Image (spheres, rainbow, N blue to C red):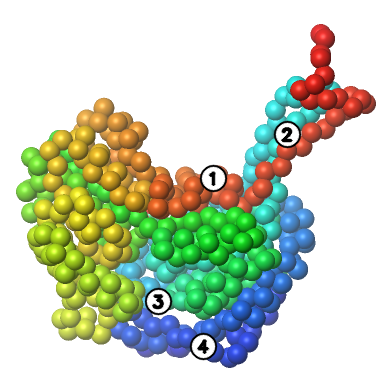
Amino acid sequence: MTVATATYKNLIGGEWVDSSDGATFEVKDPANGELLGVFPESTREDVDRAVAAARGAYDKWRLMPAPHRGEILYKAAEIMVERKEDLAREMTREMGKVLAETRGDVQEAIDMLYYMGGEGRRMFGEVVPSELPDKMALSTRLPVGVVGAITPWNFPIAIPSWKLAPALICGNTVVFKPAEDTPILSLRLVEILIEAGLPKGVVNVVFGHGAVAGDAIVKHADVDLITFTGSTATGKAITKGAAEDLKRVSLELGGKNVIIVHEDADLDLAVEGIVWSAFGTSGQRCTAASRIVIHEKVYDEVAKRVVAAAEALTLGHGLEDGTDVGPVINQKQLDRISSYRAIGEADGATLLTGGERATEGDLADGFFYKPTVWGNVSPKARIAQEEIFGPVTALIKVSSFDEAIAVANDTTYGLSSSIFTKDVNLAFKAMRDLYTGITYINAGTTGAEIQLPFGGTKGTGNGHRDAGTAALDVYTEWKALYIDFSGKIQKAQIDELTF
Ligand code: UN1
């Protein structure tokens, strides 16, 4: 397969421009190393110009009625529906995951554009009674200003849509730095927004790496809000960098997501859910199931079936028919995932399958890692505590429901959790007691829909949520309005009322 290599530019104030010093970086297919594109390596100066363009476009955009902003998002969704297949194919080349999953990624962006387009005609505030006569009290939303959006490579178009669509519908302008591994698909989203009628300067794109371009956005005095999805370490650095200006920071960080298999579970369902959640997207989802907590009565059976299913998965290029699992994103991630083999052994866990690169035939040209299952993992082991972000999962044996919940909650993360059980009482206890932002009953840990809040507790974030109406709280400031039509100066909490 030959793919035309293109040279791309930053988008600043509606103009396509090179980086200020002309530096570039390359983007390659993780399955075979093919060169796909050359991108500007943005400097602090480029970020300064992008922020100035976003600020310049802000007043016009915030004053456009929200339903009109919504129409641009609807139009973008419609264009994306038409191009879904092409976008999905291009994404598989750039990011590696299989075509069914890249179609899902594009669909998630379509869903988000439609959903947030609808918010243009909702974006509800509140009207509440005033404690004084002839006075009205209500709340409404104001945009925050210039949003710096920094996004990861694992959902190259969906996650940018989670940031850009709500930011835009609320009336903010944006400086967007997509992940350096997947800039092509992120750029496609912006191109589509422009085609749908987005005015110049409302979204500005600076390509590059976190150390310079990302850092410049985070520390820029004229950026009001940083929205970031990525690692917990980077999230902490962003929080510190943004503290000087007291910027609002919305973070979606790591996960160590858990599936509980209770003794009464439907094991066919549970095994299918485990395999999909652990090895789909090569385990590179924030929501991937990297811990499976299994009741001792069914542990051996579940372990046997999960190992057999993992070994039956076909690795290959995501565009080839029959591929179940694509490559991981890059050499650095491959090295990181590989390093957990020795860590798991040192933890005293039993390697049941995988634990090494896959190098048969063409796989040697890409970053392929065998689906890996560790057995008899201690809940405190590093492979049960640290986010590996690859096709690796840890089986943990427990002897009761209460122990399962305690083990499930015993991590520094809190994104997604699930339980397989037929006992309705236990299902409700799990919904209440699993301290995560998302809990599934009789399903795996992945597959969140965009109309509900997405995010997690503890080290997974800082209390904000992507998606759903909760996202509106990230991208707006609440404003309270009091309208006194009594013709007097009335004093709240002071005036004695007689009726
Ligand atoms: C992520 O991995 O950061 O729920 C996002 C899911 C997807 C989104 C994952 N809808 O797995």
Residue 362 located left or right of residue 131 = left
Q: Is there any visible trace of residue 381 in the rendered image?
A: yes
Alpha-carbon span between mark 4 and mark 3: 17 Å
The reply to whether discs 4 and 1 touch (Cβ–Cβ < 8 Å) is: no
- Pointer 3: residues within 10 angstroms few (<14), some, or many (20+)? many
**Which sits earlier in the primary sequence, circle 4 or circle 3?**
4
Residue 241 occupies which quadrant of the picture?
A: bottom right
Q: Select label 1 or label 3 by which is in front.
A: 1
Query: Which disc number belongs to residue 94?
Result: 3
Q: CA distance from mark 2 to mark 1?
A: 19 Å
Q: Nearer the viewer, mark 3 or mark 2?
A: 2
Q: CA distance from mark 2 to mark 4?
A: 50 Å
Instruction: Tell me if label 4 and label 3 are in contact, CB under 8 Å.
Output: no
Q: Which residue is mark 2?
A: 138
- Tag nearer the camera, 4 or 3: 4
Label 2 sits on what residue type?
Answer: Leu
Left/right placement of residue 21 relative to residue 100 reads right
Mark 4 highlights which residue? 24
Q: Amino acid at mark 3?
A: Glu
Place of residue 406 in the rendered image (x, y in percent of width and height, measured from the top left)? 25, 40
| Quadrant housing residue 64 | bottom right
Residue at point 44%, 74% (across, down):
182
CA separation in Å, label 4 and label 1: 37 Å
Asked if the beta carbon under badge 1 is closer than 8 A to the nearest atom of ligand 1, the reply is: no
The structure residue drawn at horizontal position 59% and vertical position 46%, both measured from the top left corner, is 473
What secondary structure is marked by label 2? Answer: strand
Instruction: Name the residue that disc number 1 marks.
Output: 470
